Amino acid sequence: MTARRIAVVGGGAAGVFAAVAAAENQPDARVTVFEASEEPLEKVRISGGGRCNVTHHCFDPAALVANYPRGGRELRGPFSRFQPRDTVTWFERRGVALKAEADGRMFPVTDTSKTITDCLLDSAMHAGVDLRLRARVGSVAVDPTSGRFIISLHDQSDESADRVLIATGSGPQGYRFARELGHTIVPCVPSLFTFKIDDPRIAALAGISFAQVDTELQAGEHTLKQSGPLLITHWGMSGPAILKLSAWGARLLHDHRYRARLRVNFLPGRSPVEVYQSLVECRNEHGKRRVQTHNPFGVPRRYWQMLVAHTGTPDTTTFSELSRPAMDLLIEELTRAEFEVRGKGIYKEEFVTCGGVDLREIDFRTMQSRLVPGLYFAGEVLDIDGVTGGFNFQSAWTTGWIAGEAMVRS
């Protein structure tokens, strides 16, 4: 029999992982990866500030899917077959140990993404995968006579294949291939981005971070809530709490032209009444202390000093001299401060989009198209995206692994 020919369009995380899975499961298969650039796995290389956030330390599929604004329901079955625990094992068997940080993100113990890219490329080479760089695909079509796929390259050459996997990430060419083959593309908009906020209260406070805040985003009649760390930046706000809001609200914010109202509780779990009582106690017990220098709530010092100044309270004012209007404004700013979101920035660690191939047209048992036999999809080309923390790579590993196995077994 002629060896099955498998073409993988896209040399990113999902594409390379799928190619390795296919080649290792069927050594006789001829597996070729077509990558348009000179450098495969570019997103893996730059992710996590060059450290590569490989996955997340969440080994319960039911809990894992809660981190996917789009695609969580469809990923429940795939995660029962290949989840973060399997990712850890996969890399460990190839000599790469991963570590979990306090927030659950998992990185190679070497703290360099080169460890991951080298492991993937070495695995591909040892499995016999033909990795072709600078091989830009112009079209993917089905030969009506043979039923095989014809991959046309920009250098005017054609390749044929029995199975094709499209794993082009959020690149427009992958959506074009899918559309030309009859698939529906859910319009793509950015996900995982920072908020642009031009506000004098935070203008000089870039770099200040809060370990935990509660946030509420109002866009039109819709409200979203998230909790987590927050970071003040030169352009506004970032950090996991903001990034989660941007992910879950990706399409909502796009529709509202990234204009929204953000409310932040910098003292999560504490009500305005409780904060008032704390200020009264501070006035009774530390009445002679200056408000500007005595911070009873543990918020960052510079932020507290800004809040005191924002109330119009002089630097020399003691707690016994603190006026009720100033106290009320402090409580307001600590527990329900409001900011106007006037645009989006980017999240440099990981660029993710919301949208892609319609999930209703994919069989998630195999990642095969329900419309075109022999056509498979994996990774971000699908309408799947996760919050920050390694979840997007995990969906790439999972969908790539399932597609790789299915292409040589089906």
Image: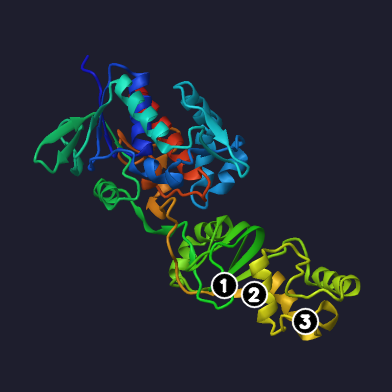
Secondary element at image label 2: helix
Residue placed under numbered mark 2 in the picture: 306
Q: Is residue 314 above or below residue 214?
A: below
Name the spot of residue 144 as percent of width and height, x first: 16, 37
Left or right: residue 244 versus residue 381 is: right
Which quadrant is home to the N terminus? top left
Report, in whole angstroms, how far the alpha carbon at label 3 lies from the one at label 1: 23 Å
Name the spot of residue 142 as percent of width and height, x first: 20, 38
Report, in whole angstroms, how far the alpha carbon at label 1 lies from the one at label 2: 8 Å
Residue depicted at 30% across the width and 33% down the height: 374
Q: Amino acid at mark 2?
A: Met
How many other residues sit within 10 Å of disc 1, few (<14), some (14-19) or many (≥20)? Answer: many
Residue lying furthest left in this view? 156
Mark 3 and mark 1 residues within 8 Å of each other at the beta carbon: no
The quarter of the displayed image where residue 35 is located: top left
The quarter of the displayed image where residue 131 is located: top left
294 or 260, nearer to the observer: 294
Left or right: residue 103 versus residue 203 is: right
Nearer-N-terminus badge (1/2): 1
Residue placed under numbered mark 1 in the picture: 202
Nearer-N-terminus badge (3/1): 1
286 or 201, nearer to the observer: 286
Name the spot of residue 81 as percent of width and height, x first: 52, 29
Residue depicted at 44% across the width and 51% down the height: 349
Q: Amino acid at mark 3?
A: Thr
Mark 2 or 3: in front is 3
Secondary element at image label 3: loop
Q: Amino acid at mark 1?
A: Ile
Residue placed under numbered mark 3 in the picture: 317
Mark 3 or 1: in front is 3
Q: Is residue 344 above or below residue 143?
A: below
Mark 1 and mark 2 residues within 8 Å of each other at the beta carbon: yes
